[in-house]
Amino acid sequence: MKNKSNLITIIVFITLVYSLSVLNVFSKDKDFSLNENRYLASKPKVTIKSVFDGQFGKKFEQYINDQFVFRDLWMGSKTSLQIGVKNKDINGVYICDNGYLIEQHLEKDFDNKQFENNINYISEFTNYCKNYIDNKNISVMIVPNAELILEENLPKYAQSFDQNEKIDKVKLNANDVNFIDVRDILKSHKDENIFYKTDHHWTTKGAFLAYEEWCNSVEKTQYTLKRVSSSFRGSLYSKVLYNKAQYDNIDLFLDKTKYTVTYANNGFKSESIYDFDKLKEKDKYQVFFGGNHSEIKINTENKNNKNLLVVKDSFANSFIPFIIKDYENIYILDLRYYKGNVKEYFIQNNVTDIFILYNIINFSNDKNISKLRG
Amino acid sequence: MFLFVFLPSVLLIYYVCPKKFRNLVLFVSSLVFYAWGEPVYIVIMIFSTVFDYFNGLLIEKYRQKGQLKKTKIVLINSIIINLAILFFFKYTDFFINNINLLLSSNIQTLDLALPIGISFYTFQTMSYTIDVYRGEVKAQKNIISFGAFVVLFPQLVAGPIVRYKTIATQLDERKESQEQFANGVHRFIIGLGKKVLLANNIGLVWEQISSYNIETLSTATAWIGAIAFSFQIYFDFSGYSDMAIGLGKMFGFNFLENFNYPYISKSITEFWRRWHISLGTWFKEYVYFPLGGNRGGKAKQIRNIFIVWGLTGFWHGASWNFVVWGLYFAVLLIFEKMFLLKYLERIPSFFSHLYTLIFVLFSWVIFAFDGFSKVVLYFKAMLGFNSLTFDNASIYFVYTNLILFVVLAISSTEILKNLSNTIIEKCLKHSALVVILKNALYIFIFLSSITFLVGDSYNPFLYFRF
């Protein structure tokens, strides 16, 4: 029996190791992981230099790891194991009891220096613009994360950084312009799916509440939402590949106003800001504008001479649909990709209104906001 | 990567080759393994191999001719060169920084990357020439066999430090067997599980806690952090040793044990008999005894203990906190030798366990931090000088990692080993059920470890300073 036992051990081990090795060699390499929404490492080229400085070894390791057979299955199993031993945060995502996945941000993930700098860049920019337009026409909105709005959904005693303190700081520094504080309105509707359960973005509903806050409830808009997908699993799902995660709905606000959207980088024009083809893909949030672009122009039928400049991150993509009807032209810049001079852009386009919208995390960590200096 | 490209290839080539080429296979594959991460530094390793290969031969030749003086010169030369290599790569910047600090001079540091495993293989080659000099082993005639000993990949990066005399005969005449291979597989999987499932996961807790501001850390969180690091370093280090021993067995070697449940010790003296045994033995044999050990009176013994433990600490890294860490143990060991051990044996074992664990825990805090000011702040946090006793963070860490902590605690003791032995021997003998269950368990650990290796980016290497 003892001999047999040894033999079994050896056979099982050898079979496992060799079959996985062989599968790894023969499985076809993938360029892109749909689930993780990122490009995977490809086989590195052997050069004398890369072998000698150790780069080849490192890249090869990354390659093997990224192209490991059944990668998604392994990752999902890891999540199941961790949930099995009652872990509540996995790969920086809190697994919440009511089906919510909420991204974890700790004090150490927060770049305080960059944050302070970004606040200064914003004030410097708005001060410049105040020479040309009224300060009431400059609006700043910093969107809190689900971590704050849905804090009651987090696992008990979970750690997170103090978002309120940070947002207060931005607010204080933006006291000479129109700072739109959306925390209270979002909080009071926290049970109405204002954040996606599996994605870090807010939903169209959440963005609408923020829009109402901006309008100061002067004119309540009639709005109806149309459900275009109920099988969305977003960025946070990708991080954990948790098989019990829920599916999100995507609702869109369909406006009657007629307009043309122009994507500056490729000159593509469209009658709709929605790219419905993206609903067939994994990252369905890209239905808004087809994703992030350096510069987008929207020209509407509303000839009121109001030209809005939006400086934003991806949270604005689901917000902009609500404001299209209010302007003649909307210029949207994403500083992560835009390379031009923003101040000149502001002058050239006869901008009458400015709207700066960032999520608090992006706002604190984005190095590109320095581009506002000119 | 290692598991699914390197290991299967080497195993295949190794067992396909006839016996006389097997050391060559190990030698070459180990060089490939090392070159993977450190392509340039492979030169040092080859130099070290060739150099001490000839030193061994020379020592033996001179001894046969009766020229004892010359044997001594060769030995001293060997030790000096080995230490010089180690010092140059590991400690030069440390000394430059200290001289700069002392004389407020401005000497440029070298900023050399430390060759991985250099502290391990220089110690191994030194043990060889010393043992040949002492006549405890014959010099190795075959440079390939000697090379295989120096660069053997299983223990190359994180030990254990294999002394030549312990595997001298195995190098030339070992018999690989099914039983040994199977044991090796089990041992390897245990090691892998310790490293990937236990150490890495508890390491996340420590990583998070150590990133907090120490001055506002609550007492409970500070203790949880220190406990987490203690578990991390033990399971990481002993996991590597288990993997090395297991791999060794797959290739027919029997390395000596490196860890023996250190956290069940009842004194610091016992702890160091169970922790990193290969390093302790090395220093005992090649430093402590030559200095005179405990012969020559109390004063001399105390001096020797200080020297040995200062060096042991310094071996762990070129930084003052490692020296302090070593001396901290020297002091404890001296106290124990003088009077404490007697009391420890008399009091209930619960208290001697507690005493040992607490002092070991504090030692890891000295070990874990780079600067000494952080160590002091962390001690303060642990001793309750900060305003909070416990906070939400402490509760969160405990309840989300409770199962992990329990598994870690149980695995630190011999309970599981004894339990499985009892079940196997008394109740079931070697019935088919046991075989199936046992293998299923190993497969589970193995597959789980792969999920963490594939799905995780967090895989720290703690010994880059060794």
Image (spheres, coloured by chain):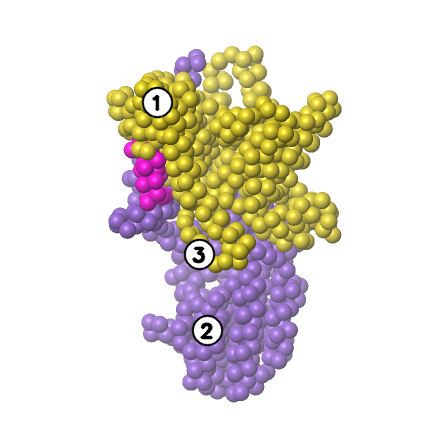
Q: Say whether residue B405 is visible.
A: no
Callout 2 secondary element: helix
Residue placed under numbered mark 3 in the picture: B108
| Image location (x, y in percent) of residue A255 | 49, 73
Identified at 67% across, 31% down, the residue is: B335
Q: Quadrant of residue B260?
A: top right
Residue placed under numbered mark 2 in the picture: A371
Chain B: its colour in the image is yellow
Residue placed under numbered mark 1 in the picture: B67
**In this image, B84 relative to B213: left or right?**
left
| Number of disc labels | 3
**Image vertical order of residue A108 relative to residue B257, above or below:** below
Q: Which residues are magenta?
A: B27-49
Q: Is residue B393 magenta?
A: no
10 Å crowding of disc 3: few (<14), some (14-19), many (20+): few
Identified at 67% across, 35% down, the residue is: B358
Q: Chain ID for label 2?
A: A
Identify by letter the chain in purple: A
